[in-house]
């Protein structure tokens, strides 16, 4: 293990955090290839996870004076980057192992290119079928897309607020208006949005985020991973979802570990009033709604900062805050395709196998995990913890911004792994089998089902343990709600903390 890594140091100091904390971060000396990819995903995973833990440790240090080491193994980290694949409930693997609906994927187009469609949510699937005017089968979709040019279909889908992207190389993305708008955008941005008193601290805390209340209004993968990480460090994370929006239960079960879950319908005045009351007592609000979605309901950045001085407002988007695509919806797989990763990985694999790598014969190749989502989730947790530190040292209300496309740009900046080394020495992901692969079994932890009023025998989950090993404040690996409506829309009592620390409006 080495005491610091250049990518970690750059991101840490860019947020104005003290360099004397960096020696407490212990990362693998040779992190790549930690998995069979031409990208430095071992470096990516251990850096993002390590920084989220180190920033939590720094907040704990500011509150208690206690320093600690944060240790991350690169292989453990890349496995945690695919944590949704191996969890079990009551001893059974859940789902098929695929994150995607049967129609989702990459299809050839008329101009001898490709588009990727995302159909996990019913309205997205129906929207794509409405454009194509075809039956809901892969064969029918493939035939219909052969009547479209890739960019034309991408443009039509976006105009209808659907999700599809044309395949591009890195060079093509760099010349695209959105690629140019993102150039030099860091993966994590902290912005002071309002004045507020400094957070005053004293007392003892067993975990870094004890007493911190977090509203988690995120969905799918990146945001939920962030909330899960913050809960592991002691925060009271309340996941708020809508009963009217489709869910992804096979992901939600695993990513809600450590949280409490409730449901509110923000089209209802009564439920909006409930959320308003929760905001007034929150320390952090995380959201990944479509751009402008929460602002229309009265929960935009300025609204929340005005209601709760000192709050941290953390946002995730697909393509960032500037450029022609800033309002477009997107998911990891689509951003990988649009920004060049699928072409670059395919070219590297072709070089390894000595096969034809011309554009006409090249099949797009995905990364071995949803690396943009997971990296974005941990970097958002890092940004939130860094902002919490600033509420002590500077005061103020803060916004944290992370986009999948900017995270992808950061991953590119870390360089590539030689194709022969990447695909001959990089180990593939373990299989989804029972009994579980020994590598997965070694890293698994067991957690019990939680809820306000369970009427049946609690379920038991096994899942990949958190890769950030904290020397003084071990992460919490105790329970999971395993459903989206397991708790009331209220905070846990703050009596244990209010006389010790946090600024309360």
Image (cartoon, rainbow, N blue to C red):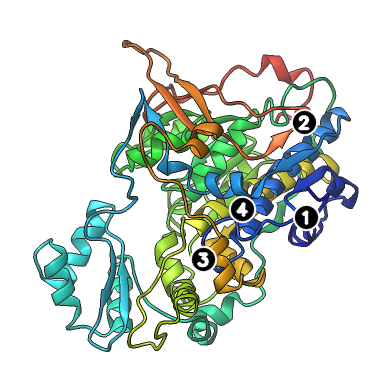
Residue at the spot x=45%, y=33% of the render?
A: 273
Marks 1 and 4: which is nearer the front? 4
Residue linked to disc 4: 45
Q: Nearer the viewer, residue 442 or 452?
A: 442
Looking at the image, is mark 4 or mark 2 earlier in the sequence?
4
Locate residue 98 relative to residue 42 in the image: left or right: left
Residue linked to disc 2: 471
Q: Position of residue 321 (x, y in %)?
A: 56, 67
Residue linked to disc 1: 12
- Kindly state the secondary structure of the residue where label 4 is placed: helix
Residue linked to disc 3: 423
Whether residue 74 is situated above or below residue 132 in the rendered picture: above
Please indicate, yes or no, whether residue 280 appears anywhere in the rendered image: no
- Kindly state the secondary structure of the residue where label 3 is placed: helix
Q: Which mark is residue 464?
A: none
Q: Position of residue 169 (x, y in %)?
A: 47, 81
Label 3 Cα neighbours within 10 Å, binned few <14 / some 14-19 / many ≥20? many
Question: For the residues marked 3 and 1, what is the alpha-carbon distance in whole angstroms?
Answer: 31 Å
Which quadrant of the structure image shows residue 462?
A: top left
Question: For the residues marked 1 and 4, what is the alpha-carbon distance in whole angstroms?
Answer: 15 Å
């Amino acid at each position: 293990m080495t005491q610091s890594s250049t990518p970690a140091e750059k991101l840490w100091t860019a947020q104005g955090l003290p360099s004397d904390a960096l020696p407490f971060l212990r990362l693998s000396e040779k992190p790549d290839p930690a998995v069979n990819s031409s990208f430095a995903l071992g470096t990516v995973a251990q850096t993002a996870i390590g920084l989220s833990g180190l920033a939590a440790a720094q907040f704990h240090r500011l509150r208690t004076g206690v320093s600690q080491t944060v240790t991350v193994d690169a292989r453990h980290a890349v496995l945690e980057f695919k944590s949704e694949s191996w969890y079990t409930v009551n001893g059974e693997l859940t789902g098929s192992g695929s994150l995607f609906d049967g129609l989702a994927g990459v299809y050839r187009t008329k101009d001898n290119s490709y588009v990727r469609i995302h159909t996990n949510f019913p309205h997205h699937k129906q929207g794509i079928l409405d454009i194509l005017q075809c039956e809901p089968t892969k064969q029918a979709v493939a035939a219909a897309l052969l009547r479209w040019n890739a960019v034309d279909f991408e443009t039509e889908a976006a105009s209808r607020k659907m999700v599809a992207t044309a395949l591009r190389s890195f060079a093509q993305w760099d010349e695209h208006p959105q690629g140019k708008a993102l150039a030099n955008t860091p993966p994590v941005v902290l912005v002071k949005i309002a004045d507020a008193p400094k957070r005053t601290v004293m007392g003892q805390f067993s975990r870094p985020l004890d007493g911190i209340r977090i509203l988690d209004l995120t969905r799918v993968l990146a945001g939920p991973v962030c909330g899960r990480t913050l809960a592991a460090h002691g925060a009271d994370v309340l996941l708020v979802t809508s009963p009217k929006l489709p869910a992804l239960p096979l992901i939600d079960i695993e990513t809600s570990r450590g949280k409490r879950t409730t449901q509110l319908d923000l089209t209802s005045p009564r439920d909006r009033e409930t959320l308003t009351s929760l905001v007034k007592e929150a320390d952090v609000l995380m959201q990944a709604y479509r751009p402008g979605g929460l602002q229309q309901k009265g929960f935009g950045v300025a609204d929340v900062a005005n209601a709760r001085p000192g709050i941290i407002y953390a946002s995730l988007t697909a393509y960032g805050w500037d450029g022609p695509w800033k309002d477009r919806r997107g998911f990891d797989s689509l951003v990988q395709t649009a920004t060049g990763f699928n072409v670059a990985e395919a070219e590297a694999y072709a070089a390894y196998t000595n096969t034809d790598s011309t554009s006409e014969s090249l099949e797009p190749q995905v990364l071995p995990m949803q690396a943009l989502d997971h990296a974005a989730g941990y970097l958002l947790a890092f940004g939130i913890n860094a902002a919490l530190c600033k509420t002590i040292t500077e005061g103020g209300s803060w916004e944290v911004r992370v986009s999948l496309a900017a995270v992808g740009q950061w991953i590119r900046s870390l360089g590539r792994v030689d194709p022969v080394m990447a695909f001959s020495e990089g180990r593939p992901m373990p299989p989804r089998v029972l009994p579980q692969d020994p590598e997965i079994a070694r890293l698994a932890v067991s957690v019990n089902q939680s809820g306000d009023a369970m009427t049946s025998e609690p379920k038991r989950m096994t899942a990949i343990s958190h890769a950030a090993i904290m020397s003084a404040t071990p992460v919490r690996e105790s329970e999971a709600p395993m459903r989206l409506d397991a708790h009331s829309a209220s905070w846990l009592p703050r009596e244990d903390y209010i006389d010790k620390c946090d600024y309360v409006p």
